[in-house]
Structure formats: structure tokens, C-alpha cells
């Protein structure tokens, strides 16, 4: 019996697919190269892209609570950024448009991008835009 168990377990281990990279890890590796997750007043001068917290809050103003619409808008924008698709004109003015995600990270699959967009939807569900008086100062 023992002689059968080891070969069977070995075969099972070898056929189990490698665990996929988690959406937050993909965000950190790809999106996080430019986007902070949260506003950080101490690092304001280091920012090269708007914080994801603010992008999610702006996008929710457009999409409301509809996950499918939110995710579709994220995917459409990151694959082919355009000013007409942007949800924050001030961010475009300050940082410009991002490059298409496929130009910078061509190895990312549509499934991974969709998983990250869903992670953004969930992770920043309560993100709020600062009041108009605080926006320029990036108050916490």
C-alpha cells in the first residue's frame, strides 16, 4: 500500500496548477509602480500618478455602485487611455495620461486585469473625495 501512496501523491502534486498571483500583488507590482494606494501628504512630491483611492472615488461618482460598470470602465481606460475617458481632469492636467497597460506590462492577462479591477472596486469601496477646499492640499 505504501508503495502506491507515494507515486500517487507525487503525481497529484505535479498536476496541481501553480497558484495564481493575487490581485493585490499584481496591483503592487504593476499599478503600484506609479499609483500609491492611498493619499499620502508626506509623499505628495513623489507622486507620478494619482492615488488609486482617489481614482476609485472619482470613478464611483460616474458608475455608482455597479461593479460590472466600474470594472468595465477601469479595463477600457487602462487598455486605451484617453482624456475623454478620464474621470478626473485635474489628475490628467497634473500627471498626463498613463501609457496603455499592455505597453508597460504586456505579460498581464485579461483575467489578471479584471481581477485587479475587481480588487480596486472592493478595496476602495468607501473611498471619499476630499472637500473642494482640501483637494489641492491633498489633506488626509
Image (cartoon, rainbow, N blue to C red):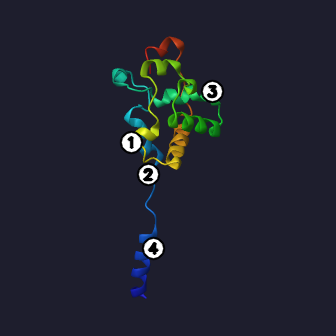
Whole-number angstrom distance, CA of label 1 to CA of label 2: 10 Å
Mark 3 Cα within 10 Å, few/some/many (few <14, many 20+)? some
Sooner in the amino-acid sequence: mark 2 or mark 4: 4
Q: Say if 49 sits above or below 136 in the image.
A: below
Q: Secondary structure at mark 3?
A: helix
Q: Position of residue 68 (x, y in %)?
A: 64, 40
Tell me whether the residue at label 1 lies in contact with that at label 3, contact meaning CB atoms closer than 8 angstroms: no
Nearer the observer: mark 4 or 1; the answer is 1
Which residue is depicted at the point 45% across and 43% down? 24
Whole-number angstrom distance, CA of label 2 to CA of label 4: 21 Å
Q: Position of residue 44 (x, y in %)?
A: 37, 21
Q: Position of residue 81 (x, y in %)?
A: 51, 31
Q: Which residue is mark 3?
A: 62
Q: Which residue is mark 2?
A: 21
Q: Nearer the viewer, residue 24 or 78?
A: 78
Sooner in the amino-acid sequence: mark 4 or mark 1: 4
Q: Say if 72 sits above or below 59 in the image.
A: below
Which residue is depicted at the point 44% across and 51% down? 21
Sooner in the amino-acid sequence: mark 3 or mark 4: 4
Q: Which mark is residue 12?
A: 4
Tell me whether the residue at label 1 lies in contact with that at label 2, contact meaning CB atoms closer than 8 angstroms: yes
Which residue is depicted at the point 48% across and 14% down? 134
Q: Which mark is residue 29?
A: 1
Amino acid at each position: 500500500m505504501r508503495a502506491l501512496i507515494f507515486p500517487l501523491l507525487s503525481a497529484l502534486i505535479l498536476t496541481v496548477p501553480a497558484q495564481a498571483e493575487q490581485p493585490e500583488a499584481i496591483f503592487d507590482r504593476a499599478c503600484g509602480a506609479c499609483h500609491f494606494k492611498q493619499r499620502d501628504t508626506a509623499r505628495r512630491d513623489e507622486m507620478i500618478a494619482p492615488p488609486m483611492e482617489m481614482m476609485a472615488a472619482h470613478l464611483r461618482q460616474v458608475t455608482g455602485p455597479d461593479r460590472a460598470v466600474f470594472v468595465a470602465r477601469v479595463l477600457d481606460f487602462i487598455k486605451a487611455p484617453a482624456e475623454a475617458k478620464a474621470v478626473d481632469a485635474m489628475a490628467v492636467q497634473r500627471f498626463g495620461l498613463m501609457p496603455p497597460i499592455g505597453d508597460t506590462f504586456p505579460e498581464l492577462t485579461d483575467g489578471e486585469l479584471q481581477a485587479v479591477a475587481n480588487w480596486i472596486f472592493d478595496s476602495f469601496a468607501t473611498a471619499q473625495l476630499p472637500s473642494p477646499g482640501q483637494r489641492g492640499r491633498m489633506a488626509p
